[in-house]
Amino acid sequence: MPLMQSAPGPETILDGRRYLYFAGTGYLGLQGHPDVLKAAADAVYQYGLSSATSRTGFGNNPPTLEVEERAAAYFGQEAAFYYISGYVGNAILAQWLRDQFDVAFLDELAHYSVIEGLAMAQRPVITFRHCDADDLAAKVAAHLQPGQRPLVMSDGVFPSLGHIAPIPAYAEVMARYPGGLICLDDAHGGGAIGPAGRGTFDYFGLDGAPGGGRSAGPTGLYFSGTLSKALGGQGGIISGSREWIDQLKASSHYFNGASQPAVPVAAASAKALEIVSNHPELRQQLWDNVRRAKDGLGRMGLTVDDTPVPIIPLTIGSGNNMDRIQQSLMRQGIAIAYVRSYAGISAEGLLRIAIFATHTPEMIDRLLGELGENL
């Protein structure tokens, strides 16, 4: 397992060697931004490493509150809840929603955090075929009793496959059932897709709802996100109306019992959100880079989609062949991931290329050239 010895960026040091880095999830390239690092360093000396108490004690501090204020503004809402890790956002929402649905319908390739979070609600769970609204409709019709309320849970953007969940089609299904809900883990969508960079709902033009979560006609839409990927920081985030967020915090032990993100991490996250909010050209550069990479791969005869998602999965022959390609690129100083086992991939695995806003055209062209030599 390679040892990362620098901040992740377009060039990253692994095991003592500098590589062109096309892996991970730092899509906007902010994890090593000098202003983000300075914010963290300054906070260490002013606030220490942590508050050493819960937020219902004396644990609130200016960086944590700034994260919530900036995240709410970024996602177009009144307030936000900032907590220890994006991984637990599904559990927070599933527990909140447990009295508002009777049967959950889960994408069969949903991330582990979605599966584990949904289990906290202790409601029946039915899986449906990946990103298949027709199968969802059939499963709901077959398993929902009269008067029962359905909930769909899924990733917004799938982390290995790069697929975007077809939310408008899901909303059409849920609209047939009073009280139908959709809840997303949008860890890989937030910051990376949507005109305002707000993620999957933004991508499909779905507006915020004043009561918390989001709304598409009669269907309630909720999402949790993370700051640790495109948005350049660390920790999970849920946004909504001020009244709803206050209720969510009051109901969650991740507010009154769990540790909160370290104070320097919060300060860095707030600075990263400030940068993303003030520099929308970062998103445009990301989308331009994604288009350059996908166009080049398409010209090689490889199958790629035409979305702005900065995750490019490639299946090229057997697992042994993909391992060969990945190792050859590493020898050439280019790091991409060969994913052997992860939610939603086949037994052969896949090559996963991640594109950053901070990659230069020359870097992308070098990746394409070296990959082409190894096909």
Image: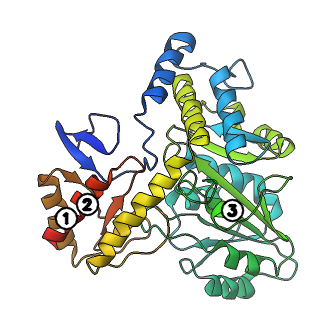
Question: Looking at the image, is mark 1 or mark 3 nearer the viewer?
Answer: 1
Residue positioned 35% across, 41% down in the render: 8
Local packing at callout 1 (Cα closer than 10 Å; few below 14, some 14-19, many 20+) is some
Percent from the top left, x then y, of residue 303?
35, 79
Mark linked to residue 365: 2
Tell which of 7 and 301 is nearer to you. Answer: 301
What whole-number distance in Å separates the C-alpha atoms at marks 1 and 3?
40 Å
Residue to which mark 1 is pinned: 369
Local packing at callout 3 (Cα closer than 10 Å; few below 14, some 14-19, many 20+) is many
Residue to which mark 3 is pinned: 183
Percent from the top left, x then y, of residue 50?
56, 20
Classify 170 as above or below 73.
Answer: below
Query: Which residue type carries mark 1?
Result: Gly
Tell which of 306 and 164 is nearer to you. Answer: 306
Residue 329 seen in the figure = yes
Q: Quadrant of the C terminus?
A: bottom left
Do residues under tags 2 and 1 come within 8 Å of each other at their CB atoms? yes
In the image, taking residue 107 as reference, residue 351 lies left or right, namely left
Query: Which residue type carries mark 2?
Result: Asp
Residue 320 seen in the figure = no
In the image, taking residue 347 as reference, residue 97 lies left or right, namely right
